[in-house]
Amino acid sequence: MVTTIPQTPNIPIQSVLIVGNYCHDVLLQGGAVVAETLGGAASFISNVLTGLSVSFHLTSKVGVDFKYPVNHDPIVVPTSKTTVFHAYFDQGYSENAHQDRVLKRVEVCDPINPSDLPDRKFDFGMTVGVGGEILPETLERMVEICDAVFVDIQALIRAFDENGTVKLVRLKESGFYHLLPRLKFLKASSDEALFMEVEEVRLWCCVVVTHGKDGCEVYWKDGEMKIAPFGANQIDPTGAGDSFLGGFVGGLVHGLVVPDAALVGNFFGSLTVAHIGLPKFDLRLLQHKCMLSNILQGSELCGSLCWKLGVNGKGRPYNAVMLLLFCQ
């Protein structure tokens, strides 16, 4: 049974703070530029939350060379350039790098300081740096002003060699380890999870580990759960984990319990890998993709929502969580 908290027009949706820099992403293959897109976890997460009708405040920094239109203006640093990442898809796997690509930071913007954050309280905070812009003191300020803080581990453990190539350091060596007991959720990919002791961290906060096409796992102090995936034709994995986190938090904002919110995260991750750059979400796409084989089969809620969308219940049952979120 899906647990939800009904949202009404008279009740403002819970507030979300996103902290992380926008980036310029350049995708290369065979020595040639395949695409140039808006990047940074903040861009993918804000795209998902907008699709889920979740209001949010975004704190992000860019340089004067920032070239993409966005709905939430960043802080423009006149003496800095926008962070730029080059993603090489034909250099194979190297130690500490992504298996599907090698990432290099070729430009870096200023870090986000505690003074850059708004002076107000939020229900949810999302720490989603990608280029080393999150400082320990900034995360500490976030846990002071946000009731629940969600952290993507890449904001904590990414380091960069002399060529700008992304490396990973162990979480205990990151300078953020002492803040773990004050976090609500820590999200990591299966590769990144190797750089922390999941069995130890789960005693302090909930840990979500994504496994790409195999879905994700949620760990907490007294248990764990596997969450089923959605099928996808992968074109570009960039931003999939970010979109997962956006969908996960968006589901929680809409009142879903953690397993169902993680399912929403899997859904948006699957949409993202099928695109280069930011995906565009529309109802027809969601109707086509909203299927899952393991929840609410035969339930009155699932049947009524499928009827509402004009789809039948033959074959695999439809994902009532997603239908609920996008059709209420």
Image: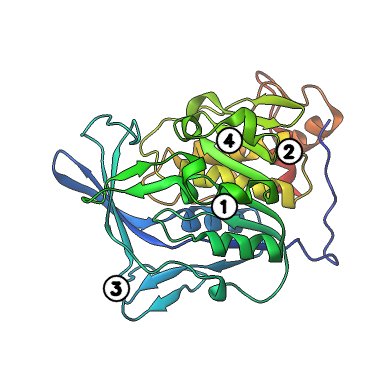
Secondary element type, mark 1: helix
x, y percent for residue 187: 57, 41
x, y percent for residue 136: 53, 59
The residue under label 4 is 266
x, y percent for residue 32: 15, 46
- Residue 284 sits in quarter: top right
Q: Earlier in the sequence, mark 1 or mark 2?
A: 1
- Residue 138 sits in quarter: bottom right
The residue under label 3 is 65
Q: Say which amino acid is labelled 4.
A: Asn
Closer to us: mark 1 or mark 2? 2
Measure the alpha-carbon separation of dots 4 and 1.
12 Å
Secondary element type, mark 3: loop
Q: Is residue 72 visible?
A: yes
Q: Say which amino acid is labelled 1.
A: Val
Measure the alpha-carbon separation of dots 4 and 2.
12 Å
